[in-house]
Amino acid sequence: MKSIHTAVREQFSQHANYYARSSAHATGDTLDVILDFAEPNGTERTLDIATGTGFTAFKLASKVAYVIATDLTPEMVTKAAELADEKTIKNVNFSVAAAESLPFANASLDLVTCRIAPHHFQDVPAFLSEVHRVLRTDGLFCMVDSVSPEPKKLIAWQNRVEKLRDDSHVYGYPPSEWDAMIMNAGLSLEKTAHVRNAEMSFLWWVRPESNPPEIVQEIRDAFAKLSPDEAKEYYTVRPAGDDFYFSWPMYAVKARRM
Ligand SMILES: C[S@@+](CC[C@H](N)C(=O)[O-])C[C@H]1O[C@@H](n2cnc3c(N)ncnc32)[C@H](O)[C@@H]1O
């Protein structure tokens, strides 16, 4: 069986340009909340894990000492580095690294961020243990990820739908499981928030150009099976002709290394 890291690289190596142009990733509350939670003072040695095409790293760059931006997929790192050049951002360095095995010294960083990525990680406890290891005492971890709602039925529904669309999706944990894993890793939870990205068009998100029509239909049917309350409350579903708009629930966390 293909490893999760291989599935991630296969998926994201094809989509570096799609992400670089994605307004759902380039802006929005999920980016702002990281800045709000981090409250940088200009001196932070910062690591942005799973940086993708660098949106979080770029937003932080002018507010911290420097950012090391890492990602598992070389094509994403290459694209992010090109964008940094275009934007003439000088204090961001890029490298290829897995979240579960970071090539940085113990206690060498003040701030670690990670946005909309851990649902692709093969081992979230290993990732959190690495975050704990590389942060200095009192250093901050600020994260946002798409999460499942707490009801068990919706945890199963959402993970099935996400995996159908993208086989590099691993697991969207509900917030209660995130809280428990973060505390188990030796980080103390200081703040949490429920946030959303901009609504996405289903027909854009489902990538009909790379997913076969029967998979697109299966995902569409899964959305149609949600009750009207579930569709509205958890996924902000809004019909629009043949298409519909929706958003995933996201969870933001500010935690301090003890
Ligand atoms: C949705 S994209 C990136 C989002 C980006 N953080 C942002 O704010 O726009 C998810 C990224 O996670 C990366 N990724 C997935 N699994 C990873 C892992 N185990 N270690 C490091 N990066 C990983 C993928 O290569 C991809 O670039």
Image (spheres, rainbow, N blue to C red):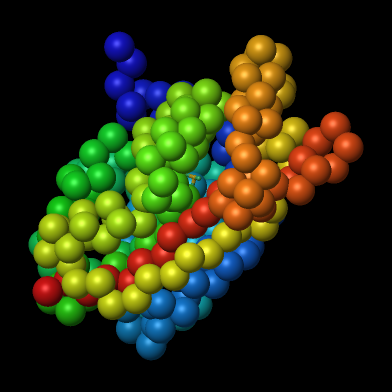
Q: Which residue is most to the bottom?
A: 41
Q: Which residue is most to the right?
A: 241
- Quarter of the image holding residue 252? bottom left
- Quarter of the image holding residue 228? top right
Whether 112 is drawn above or below 77: the answer is below
Residue 90 visible:
no
- Work out which quarter of the rendered image holds the C terminus and state it: bottom left
Residue 153 x %, y %: 43, 37
Q: Quadrant of ligand 1?
A: top left
Q: Which residue shows up at 39% across the image and 50% down it?
A: 150
Whether 232 is drawn above or below 13: the answer is below
Q: Which residue shows up at 67% across the image and 57% down it?
A: 198
Residue 202 x %, y %: 71, 37
Residue 215 x %, y %: 62, 17
> Does 31 sit left or right of 168 as displayed?
right
> Does 75 sit left or right of 135 as displayed?
right
Q: Nearer the viewer, residue 93 or 223?
A: 223
